[in-house]
Image (spheres, grey):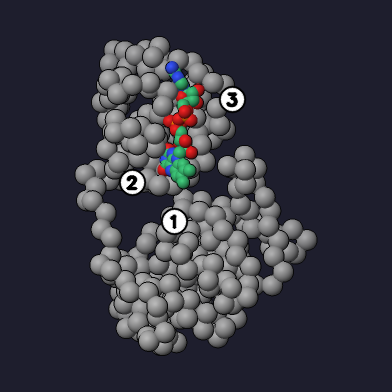
């Protein structure tokens, strides 16, 4: 059995939970989904729509606010009781905090940032990028493993839904509140996003190849011509050339539009994980070796300052 640890905050499920459920389903065998928290009825009902063996609410007041000690205590007890072959988690900030301690407490291996799994000679292998994404390593583990999946590595919409809701059961969290050493402060709230790129059907994204802030107007012309939103790689947002809510990638938004046009973006792994779920990817880059071409459906090798005006002219013509 694979145990998936879903993530929720104030009754709102982190979308990456669906990605990890999909990864567990694709790995084969029964899947149980656990959701820790104090009030998780609605989230558990939502999760029960997936084609899984069961959903377990790990509940208790000590889990109302996230703490490292609380999660390690509650989840290690759950893992000991359920005895899964592997535990799958989304590679979120929260997981990054508690997964190492949980792995130590459970005496299991921790394989982080996986992008997939496959089987060889009857052994399950976990695939994770190494050397800044230049190579993929197959990691084999003896015994049960905690495995975290990179956000966007598996499509959330590939989750198989059940014919009927999965059974939901609640188990009290085995947490001694007085043993929790951390004192959580009010949760960090992100600034409200002005634009929700996750819902955009078309995106024109600019990278460092655009050279300076004034020239973003050129990308806007192309975006206007095809009714697209503007997105960007991280250096563009770090420079303040576009607001942070336009950033796409591992530390920005994960998008999956019908059309993604990448202008002067090299295709670093941190960018790719945020957009590789796009249905059609068009890349314009003057470097024929740029990694973006490895995932592009249409690649244009050339200077974007020649190509974009030509495209705009053609589209407006
Ligand atoms: C922890 C961490 C998190 C990160 N999170 C993100 C993230 O969320 N999103 C993100 O995007 N990055 C992220 N990064 C940064 C990432 O590693 C890359 O540095 C970044 O994506 C590179 O941006 P770029 O492709 O715009 O720039 P570059 O890598 O500099 O690429 C510019 C490209 O433009 C091309 N070019 C130059 N001139 C022209 C021209 N005239 N016409 C056509 N092409 C041209 C070049 O050939 C080059 O391929 C993160 C990094 C770390 C360490």
- Reading the image, the residue beneath label 2 is 198
Looking at the image, residue 45 sits to the left or right of residue 294; the answer is left
Question: Quadrant where the C terminus lies?
Answer: top left
Q: Where residue 76 sits: x, y (%)?
A: 52, 79
Please name the residue shown 59% across and 77% down the image: 106
Question: Badge 3, how many Cα within 10 Å: few under 14, some, many 20+?
Answer: few
172 lies above or below 146:
below
310, 206: nearer the viewer? 206
Mark 1 element type: helix
Asked whether the viewer can see residue 143, the reply is yes
User: In terms of sequence position, does the residue under pointer 1 or pointer 2 come before the other?
Assistant: 1
- Reading the image, the residue beneath label 3 is 289
Please name the residue shown 40% across and 70% down the image: 47
CB atoms of marks 3 and 1 within 8 Å: no
Mark 2 element type: helix
User: In terms of sequence position, does the residue under pointer 3 or pointer 1 come before the other?
Assistant: 1
Q: How far apart are marks 3 and 1 (CA)?
A: 30 Å
Mark 3 element type: loop
Looking at the image, residue 217 sits to the left or right of residue 105; the answer is left
Q: Where residue 62 sits: x, y (%)?
A: 35, 82
The disc at residue 47 is: none
Asked whether the viewer can see residue 297, the reply is no
24 lies above or below 199:
below
Please name the residue shown 75% across and 64% down the image: 122
Corner quadrant of residue 282: top left
Q: Kindly give the residue lying farthest to the right in the view shown.
A: 121
Corner quadrant of residue 303: top left
CB atoms of marks 2 and 3 within 8 Å: no
Question: Quadrant where the N terminus lies?
Answer: bottom right
Question: Badge 1, how many Cα within 10 Å: few under 14, some, many 20+?
Answer: some
Q: How far apart are marks 1 and 2 (CA)?
A: 13 Å
């Amino acid at each position: 059995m694979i145990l998936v640890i879903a993530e929720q905050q104030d009754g709102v499920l982190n979308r990456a939970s669906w990605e990890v459920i999909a990864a567990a389903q694709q790995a084969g065998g029964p899947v149980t989904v656990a959701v820790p928290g104090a009030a998780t009825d609605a989230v558990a009902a939502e999760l029960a729509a997936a084609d899984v063996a069961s959903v377990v609410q790990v509940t208790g007041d000590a889990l109302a606010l996230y703490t490292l000690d609380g999660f390690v205590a509650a989840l290690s007890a759950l893992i000991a009781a359920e005895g899964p072959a592997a535990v799958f988690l989304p590679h979120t900030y929260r997981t990054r905090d508690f997964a190492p301690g949980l792995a130590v407490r459970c005496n299991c291996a921790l394989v982080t940032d996986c992008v997939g799994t496959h089987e060889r000679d009857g052994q399950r292998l976990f695939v994770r990028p190494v050397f800044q994404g230049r190579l993929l390593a197959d990691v084999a583990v003896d015994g049960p493993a905690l495995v975290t999946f990179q956000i966007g590595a598996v499509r959330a919409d590939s989750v198989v839904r059940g014919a009927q809701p999965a059974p939901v059961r609640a188990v009290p969290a085995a947490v001694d509140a007085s043993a929790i050493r951390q004192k959580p402060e009010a949760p960090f709230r992100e600034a409200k996003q002005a634009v929700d790129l996750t819902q955009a059907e078309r995106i024109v994204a600019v990278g460092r190849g655009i050279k300076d802030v004034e020239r973003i107007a050129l990308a806007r012309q192309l975006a206007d011509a095809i009714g697209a939103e503007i997105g960007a790689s991280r250096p563009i947002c770090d420079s303040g050339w576009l607001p942070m809510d336009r950033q796409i990638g591992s530390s920005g938004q994960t998008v999956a539009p019908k059309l993604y046009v990448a202008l002067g973006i090299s295709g670093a792994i941190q960018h790719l994980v945020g957009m590789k779920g796009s249905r059609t990817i068009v890349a314009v880059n003057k470097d024929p070796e740029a990694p973006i071409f490895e995932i592009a459906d249409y690649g244009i090798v050339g200077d974007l300052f020649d190509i974009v005006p030509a495209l705009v002219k053609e589209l407006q013509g």
